[in-house]
Amino acid sequence: MPDVHHWKTLIALAPDQELKSEGSRMAGFMAEEDVDTYAVVGSDGVKAGEVVVRDHTNVKGFKRTIRVTQSDAAGKQLLDTAYNVSK
């Protein structure tokens, strides 16, 4: 079973691009989901896209699901996938 950081192997970054954290928040009526947002930034400092990682813990059984979405600067979705991780 993949680990919680497996999403980093799924996203597509050019050699001159890196992720910069734009913030995090909690979602859900019991704050059962952590939402982290990252900017994809080129070496020139220009934002080339966005990655959003949602770490959801099911409160009835504590199953964790990681969902990652990646979009380019125009908002076109490049990746939308989810996987389960162990507790």
Image: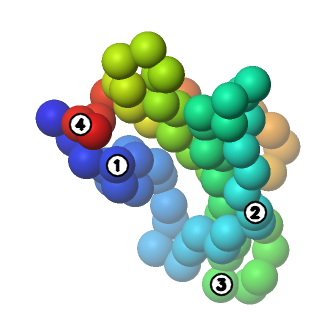
Under circle 1, the secondary element is loop
Residues packed near mark 2 inside 10 Å, few (<14), some (14 to 19) or many (20 plus): few
Query: Which mark is in front, 2 or 4?
Result: 4
The amino acid type, in three-letter code, at marker 3 is Ser
* Residue drawn at x 44%, y 14% as measured from the top left: 60
Q: Nearer the viewer, residue 50 or 44?
A: 50
Vertical comparison of 77 with 16: above or below: above
Image quadrant where residue 65 sits: top left
> Alpha-carbon distance for marks 3 and 1?
27 Å
Q: Earlier in the sequence, mark 2 or mark 4?
A: 2
Under circle 3, the secondary element is loop
> Alpha-carbon distance for marks 2 and 1?
18 Å
Q: Which residue is mark 1?
A: 4
Q: Earlier in the sequence, mark 4 or mark 1?
A: 1
Under circle 2, the secondary element is strand
Q: Which residue is mark 3?
A: 43
> Alpha-carbon distance for marks 4 and 1?
8 Å
The amino acid type, in three-letter code, at marker 4 is Ser
Q: Which residue is mark 4?
A: 86
Query: Which mark is in front, 3 or 1?
Result: 1
Residue closest to the far top:
60
